[in-house]
Amino acid sequence: HRVDRRQRQMCIRDRSGGGDSIALTYFAHEWAKANGGQITVLTVDHGLRSDSRSEAERVGGWINALGITHQILNWQGVKPKSRIQAMARNARYRLMDDWCKDNGVLHLLVAHNENDQAETYLMRKEHGSGPDGLAAMSQILELSHCRLLRPLLAENTQNLRHFLMVQNAKWVEDPSNQNPIFERVRMRLHIKDEKISCLDVATTAAQFGNSRLRNSRALSALIAFGVQLSPLGFAYVNLSVLTNASSDDIMRLFARVLMTVGGRSYAPSRTQLEFLVGKLLNNSASSVTGGGCQVIHKRDGFLVAREKRGLPLPVLVAPKETIHWDHRFKMTFGEGLSLSNGNVFVRALEDQDWAEVKLHIGKSQQKKIKAVIRHSLPALCDDTGVFAVPHFGFFRKDIAVDQGNSCDILAYLSFCPLNSMSDMGFSVASPIKPTISVSEGG
């Protein structure tokens, strides 16, 4: 835990006052008090149901009655009509990660448990995930600004509910957790109907997790010698490093490269990876796509660049704001942004932009930046058009003259992918655990 002003601080993620999150709140609060610290409970109001705000406020009342600080985070903007749970999950973690950054909190605790782990394993198995995907959830996950911890990953829901009843605790059951339109709910019902042991499934996931750790060490060495990352957001995989590698190691390598360059949270499925790698190594295709990337066969290796399809829509930005564009580039804007002609947007570089930009950069630089690479780079635009492409050192003449210093416009730019190339951060939750000790005194 992070020491900040002599207080040890952490926060608990609470989506809707669910039982698992409330149980985690009790445990973490007692632990923090015993260690001279404090917790903050975060409830995310997704705004997807008419009564979600009142539920969040009711949960806040329960939390405050325990002497714990409570914050409601709101998911604002237009809500999606498809992939609702996935989009809501992404928004939830983004909001909490940002809150942790703004409040100097390093650890974010979430209440995923053994049942969640079993559901994740079975869903990934059904989707054709490879051995790494079947390791399911890690106990520790590094986000952009904080470390996510899952301390209850080896506990089952029944024990947690029993603990809450002994405590006379209150919690909310989210009706969406009973809606079979969602895949996770269907899997939960399948586990119940077929009387599948969550402990047995979680044990299998842990075996895959331990295997994943061993393979990760070998994979990291392979990546260190065989993959080069560019500040322009692409990677190059040397063909020579693949010569003596096993097929599993090659697929793991491409999975990590695709996640890093593509900005995805998950690697392509085992089936997709087998198809992609087979095409490349058998020379049956000069270029293939997968995981949000385009992989191009070169004489001595493979160029992996972000695919043009699926790049972010234009994002409105302001001075002093920091964004993580396309889950790849971290950008902080300076006060000079205010002198642009109207609103400023960040979007992918387009062909019409390039026609103007290339007039202001050298021919040697033009040749180095292939179309597949430049199409995935961010450009700053205003009402007049593109005025800056930082990766090329291009700033439109009127902006450059006014500012005199490009740093006034863009204070910071870094290739900061959502996923690191190495997979050494995976942590296995042991399914062999003691039952929660419950006493009348709490």
Image: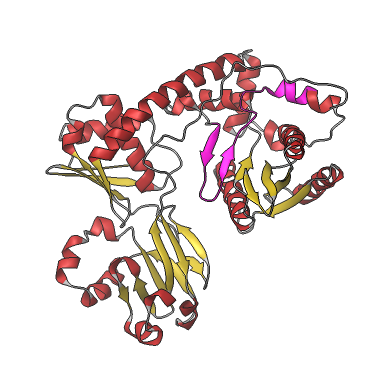
Tell me the magenta residue range. Answer: 139-162
In this picture, is 381 found above or below 295? below
Splitting the image into 4 quarters, where does residue 408 fall? bottom left
**Is residue 316 shown left or right of residue 25?**
left
In this picture, is 212 found above or below 423? above
**Is residue 200 shown left or right of residue 336?**
right
Position in image of residue 430 (x %, y %): 56, 20
Query: Residue at horizontal 20%, vertical 36%?
Result: 280
In this picture, is 352 found above or below 417? below
Closer-to-camera residue (169/424): 424
Position in image of residue 183 (x %, y %): 57, 31
Which quadrant is the C terminus positioned in?
top right
Splitting the image into 4 quarters, where does residue 348 fall? bottom left
Query: Residue at horizontal 74%, vertical 37%?
Result: 25
Residue 131 seen from this side: no
Query: Does residue 156 show up magenta in the picture?
Result: yes
Closer-to-camera residue (110/218): 218
**Is residue 302 shown left or right of residue 45?**
left
Which quadrant is the N terminus positioned in?
top right
Residue 26 seen from this side: yes
Query: Does residue 31 show up magenta in the picture?
Result: no
**Is residue 90 shown left or right of residue 232?**
right
Closer-to-camera residue (436/402): 436
Position in image of residue 54 (x %, y %): 81, 49
Closer-to-camera residue (192/12): 12
In this picture, is 19 found above or below 53? above
Query: Residue at horizontal 36%, vertical 26%?
Result: 215
